[in-house]
Amino acid sequence: MRLDSVRKRFGERCALESLSLALAPGEVYALLGPNGAGKTTTLNLILGFLRPDAGRIEVAGIDAVADPLGARARIAYLPETVMLHPTLSAIENLGYFALLGGRRLDDAQARALLNEAGLQEEAHARRAGGYSKGMRQKVGLAIALAKDARVLLLDEPTSGLDASAANDLSHGVRAAAQRGMAVLMATHDLYRVKDVAQRLGILRDGRLLLEQRTDRLSAAQIEALYLEQLSR
Ligand SMILES: Nc1ncnc2c1ncn2[C@@H]1O[C@H](COP(=O)(O)OP(=O)(O)O)[C@@H](O)[C@H]1O
Ligand SMILES: [Mg+2]
């Protein structure tokens, strides 16, 4: 997946100023930045929910601006808030959403995906109405995995999760990358970036200030880097 010199304005307001990003298959990229930096706008442009004013977006070899539906078919998306049918179980929700995407899952396949996404087995057959946010996120991730997409987009997936649920979700994200998906994750969770992502980018006011590999950085160094960039 790649973005080349993408620009997006909302009226006078410039949400993205010439953003370029390239992700390899199997790579996890953490997009960091304060509120209003342009993270969600970036995801919405890749998904084709917004049109860029300038620049190119390519998803799995498809021009996402010319063919947003074609691109979207290759993208799995985990929104900030996952909406599930409260009267259906995780297995039933997953089966339903997979079917909307054109894939029929049997119970064993559904359970395997829910396990991969980190949802405890005890909850698989329980009504989703009683789920915590973390459990809903995990079902959302299983829905994303079921899609067998080339690109996975996540918008602040761990916001509001406890440490254990966030950790489980990180496992699920790594599982997606191991399947060869390119994963772009907007996040505020600096502490978990090193764990999950091979690269990070810091966005502010629609500009990418810095990109860096995470392998030589500690969590504390990532935080220091972030704070330093934002105070410039
Ligand atoms: N639909 C919209 N209409 C007008 N302005 C918007 C719209 N969506 C986002 N913006 C503005 O674009 C900027 C980037 O927003 P957003 O991408 O949501 O940031 P982030 O996800 O990093 O918090 C903000 O200034 C926001 O107010
Ligand atoms: Mg956002």
Image (cartoon, rainbow, N blue to C red):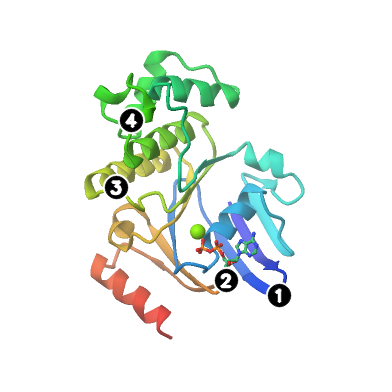
Disc nearest the viewer among 1 and 2:
1
Say which residue label 2 marks: 206
Q: CA distance from mark 2 to mark 3?
A: 27 Å
- Above or below, 37 against 174 in this view is below
Report helix, strand or loop for mark 3.
helix
Say which residue label 3 marks: 166
Q: N-terminal of the two: label 2 or label 3?
A: 3
Q: Are marks 1 and 2 in contact (CB under 8 Å)?
A: no
Classify residue 145 by image quadrant.
top left
Q: Amino acid at mark 3?
A: Ala
Report helix, strand or loop for mark 2.
loop
- Above or below, 202 against 87 in this view is below
Decide if residue 201 is on the left or right side of residue 53: left
Q: CA distance from mark 1 to mark 4?
A: 43 Å
Q: Are marks 1 and 4 in contact (CB under 8 Å)?
A: no
Classify residue 222 by image quadrant.
bottom left
Q: Amino acid at mark 1?
A: Glu
Decide if residue 102 is on the left or right side of residue 120: right
* Residue count near mark 4 (Cα–Cα under 10 Å), binned few <14, some 14–19, many ≥20: few
Report helix, strand or loop for mark 4.
helix
